[in-house]
Image: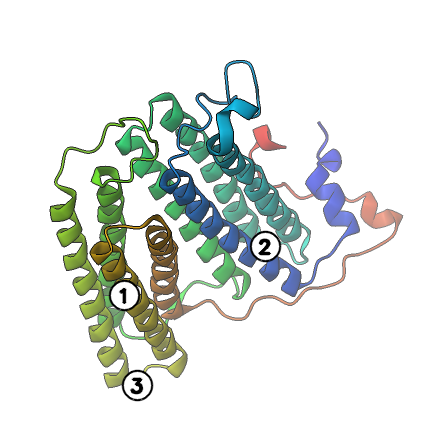
């Protein structure tokens, strides 16, 4: 198909969004990435993981839940439908980024990365149902969602900065300390997924296979890594003060402190109240917020210059006849 008929190119010729619109659509993808994690947790915590007994249909004979499936079918199917909402939001960002002038290929590429992560995770979600909530698949489903959140956060940050090579705002040892913080937080999230796979909330009222580990011992390991992440955060804060780093960086570390303290409080409440569903759901939300705060600290330690200002698109028949630039989207997705 001629490039001039590429729908992304046709929209780009007729619409030039402002930088604010591009940033807003990127932020919405971050919010939706969090929503999909929390609602996925709600499916498990309400024992609705097998509310739709098969995939991609809800039953062998029906795409949607039937009345005899009750609320569990509605909850599971509703979570599936949110995937389409997420794809729509990501698609809106891709269109906005593609239509922005000057064109920033780095943004559209990140948008397509998000799209393909969602598609891959949808397949993993189907495998989760078809395997009867295999805990290893359930854990990978959650971790892929966190990968989506990571890319969405990087995308949002990139909309607020330029395309120059990243330049560190602090010395290399300080940046290396931030790498340790990111690594420890990543391990913390992975261990949290193992706790989920071995803990009492299996996702369905029937007997579901669990990871054969003592979930209380894994929980203690999870707590140990909380202390490691907290200690690295304290070390980074003192280090930033010692090197007189920009205040905006120190502020992101303080925000991380606040999120960690809140998440730690929720964690202790859920443990000593024997894991009530609502509190566990709040802890899942807190996991997303901790990861966001960690990424904000890491991304604040470098800069890429100012984001390019939007420029009006050329108008008239002459512009319409100009050859289109190659779209970064894979050919199969056009």
Q: Earlier in the sequence, mark 1 or mark 3?
A: 3
Left/right placement of residue 127 relative to residue 27 reads left
Instruction: Answer with the quarter of the image where residue 138 lies.
Output: top left
Mark 1: which secondary structure?
helix
Mark 3: which secondary structure?
loop
Mark 2: which secondary structure?
loop
Q: Nearer the viewer, residue 297 or 291?
A: 291
Q: Earlier in the sequence, mark 2 or mark 1?
A: 2
Residue at position x 49%, y 44% in the image: 114
Is any part of residue 169 visible from this angle?
no
Q: Split into 4 quadrants, where in the image is the N terminus?
A: top right
Is any part of residue 67 visible from this angle?
yes
Q: Nearer the viewer, mark 2 or mark 3?
A: 3
Where in the figure is residue 15, as x and y percent of width and height?
76, 53
Q: What label does residue 265 carry, if any?
A: 1
C-alpha gap between disc 1 and disc 3:
31 Å
C-alpha gap between disc 2 and disc 1:
42 Å
Picture layout, residue 75 above or below residue 154: above
Q: Nearer the viewer, residue 86 or 313?
A: 86
Where in the figure is residue 58, as x and y percent of width and height?
51, 23
Quickly name the residue at label 2.
104
Residue at position x 38%, y 78% in the image: 251
Count of all numbered marks drawn on residues in the image? 3
Q: Earlier in the sequence, mark 2 or mark 3?
A: 2
C-alpha gap between disc 2 and disc 3:
34 Å
Residue at position x 22%, y 55% in the image: 271
Instruction: Answer with the quarter of the image where residue 236 lies.
Output: bottom left
Left/right placement of residue 314 relative to residue 282 reads right
Residue at position x 17%, y 64% in the image: 227
Quickly name the residue at label 3.
244
Q: What label does residue 213 carry, if any?
A: none
**Mark 2 closeness class: few <14, some 14–19, many ≥20 residues within 10 Å:** some
């Amino acid at each position: 198909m001629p490039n001039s008929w590429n729908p992304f190119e046709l929209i780009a010729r007729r619409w030039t969004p402002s930088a604010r619109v591009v940033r807003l659509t990127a932020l919405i993808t971050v919010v939706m990435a969090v929503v999909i994690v929390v609602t996925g947790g709600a499916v498990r915590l309400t024992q609705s993981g097998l509310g739709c007994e098969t995939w991609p249909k809800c039953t062998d004979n029906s795409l949607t839940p039937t009345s005899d499936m009750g609320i569990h079918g509605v909850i599971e199917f509703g979570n599936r439908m949110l995937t389409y909402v997420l794809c729509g939001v990501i698609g809106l960002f891709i269109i906005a980024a593609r239509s922005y002038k000057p064109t920033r290929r780095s943004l559209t590429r990140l948008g397509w990365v998000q799209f393909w992560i969602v598609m891959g995770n949808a397949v993993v979600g189907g495998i989760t149902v078809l395997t009867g909530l295999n805990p290893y698949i359930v854990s990978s489903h959650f971790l892929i969602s966190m990968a989506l959140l990571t890319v969405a956060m990087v995308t949002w940050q990139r909309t607020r900065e330029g395309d120059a090579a990243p330049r560190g705002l602090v010395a290399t040892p300080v940046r290396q300390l931030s790498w340790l913080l990111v690594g420890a937080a990543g391990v913390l999230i992975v261990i949290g997924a193992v706790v989920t796979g071995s803990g009492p909330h299996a996702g369905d009222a029937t007997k579901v296979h669990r990871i054969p580990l003592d979930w209380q011992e894994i929980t203690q390991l999870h707590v140990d890594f909380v202390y490691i992440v907290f200690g690295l955060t304290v070390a980074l804060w003192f280090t930033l003060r010692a090197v007189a780093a920009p205040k905006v960086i120190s502020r992101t570390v303080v925000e991380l402190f606040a999120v960690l303290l809140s998440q730690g409080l929720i964690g202790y409440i859920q443990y000593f109240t024997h894991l009530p569903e609502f509190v566990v759901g709040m802890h899942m939300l807190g996991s997303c917020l901790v990861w966001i705060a960690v990424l904000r600290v890491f991304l604040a330690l470098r800069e890429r210059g100012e984001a390019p200002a939007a420029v009006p698109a050329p108008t008239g028949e002459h512009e319409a006849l100009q050859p289109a630039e190659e779209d970064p989207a894979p050919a199969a997705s056009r």
